[in-house]
Amino acid sequence: MNAKRILACAALLLGLLSFNAPLSAAVESDVVGYTTITTTPGFNMVGVIFNGLDGKEMPLGEIVSGDFQDGDEIQVYAKNGNYQVYTYWKDSGWLNSAFEEAKAPLALGTAFWLKTPNRSVEVTLKGAVLTGEYKYESVEGLQMVALGVPKAFDLNKDLTWEGLADGDEIQIREGESYIPYTYWKDSGGWLDAGFNPADKEVPIGASVWLRTAKAGVTVIARGLNN
């Protein structure tokens, strides 16, 4: 999944906020931004990286937009490993398996599969930008994780990890394959199969597979002003 970052709106508003201290906290949380990603044909790992205004969660139709076609799918991941599947229909939008509109709000950091069969699609993700920190707490075993901030992340430099154990793993999807990294505390953190430091960033808007030996591992992603 190739990502093109387009956050000029967010950057401008962040700049204005920094010169306007009297603005209320509510206004400071409503920094609006967007980014576009280009899917690869088939399945793409994506995440909710924007909130609604005033920190409210948004339904699917407000989170993603693009030139979708009938039969495109979004499969929303739940921590128990199950998925809520939505299918796109041009005349109705995103519908669940009962052909009901996708109205349920999705929390910041929700991970999902976006399936665009046989073609690439430019998809826009949009909403209010988190200006603080996003924190994720793991379950035991394999889980699909999105980082809740519209930035690309170096695993070793840009994220704060707490509670990792040697042998914990991350897999970053690239096309139809994965780039795996393993955590080794005494060797510098996240390493590739050749024991070199991880050199692949988590792309903006992407989710990843994380496998932890125990629950309660936390990862902290800093917002745009941190």
Image (cartoon, rainbow, N blue to C red):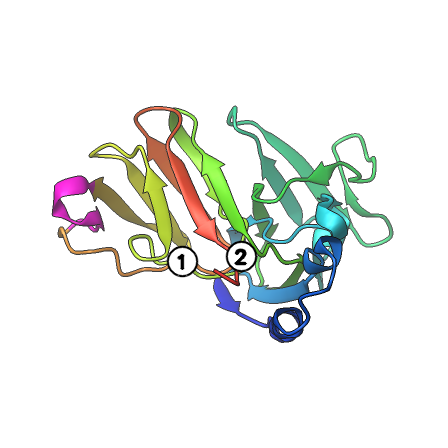
Q: Earlier in the sequence, mark 1 or mark 2?
A: 1
Viewer-nearest residue: 106 or 162: 162
Q: Which residues are magenta?
A: 184-193
Q: Amino acid at mark 1?
A: Phe
Q: Secondary structure at mark 1?
A: loop
Quarter holding residue 120: bottom right
User: x%, y% of residue 85?
Assistant: 66, 36
Q: Amino acid at mark 2?
A: Gly
Q: In this figure, which residue is indicated by the disc labeled 1?
A: 153
Viewer-nearest residue: 87 or 12: 12
User: x%, y% of residue 3?
Assistant: 50, 66
Q: Residue at x 53, y 58 (%)?
A: 41
Q: In this figure, which residue is indicated by the disc labeled 2?
A: 205
* Mark 1 and mark 2: Cα distance apart in space: 10 Å
Q: Is residue 161 above or below residue 132?
A: above
Q: Residue at x 64, y 62 (%)?
A: 123
- Horizontal side of 165 relative to 194 (left or right) equals right
- Residue 187 magenta-drawn? yes
- Horizontal side of 88 relative to 117 (left or right) equals right
- Residue 213 magenta-drawn? no
Quarter holding residue 15: bottom right
The crowd level at tag 2 (other Cα within 10 Å; few <14, some 14-19, many 20+) is many
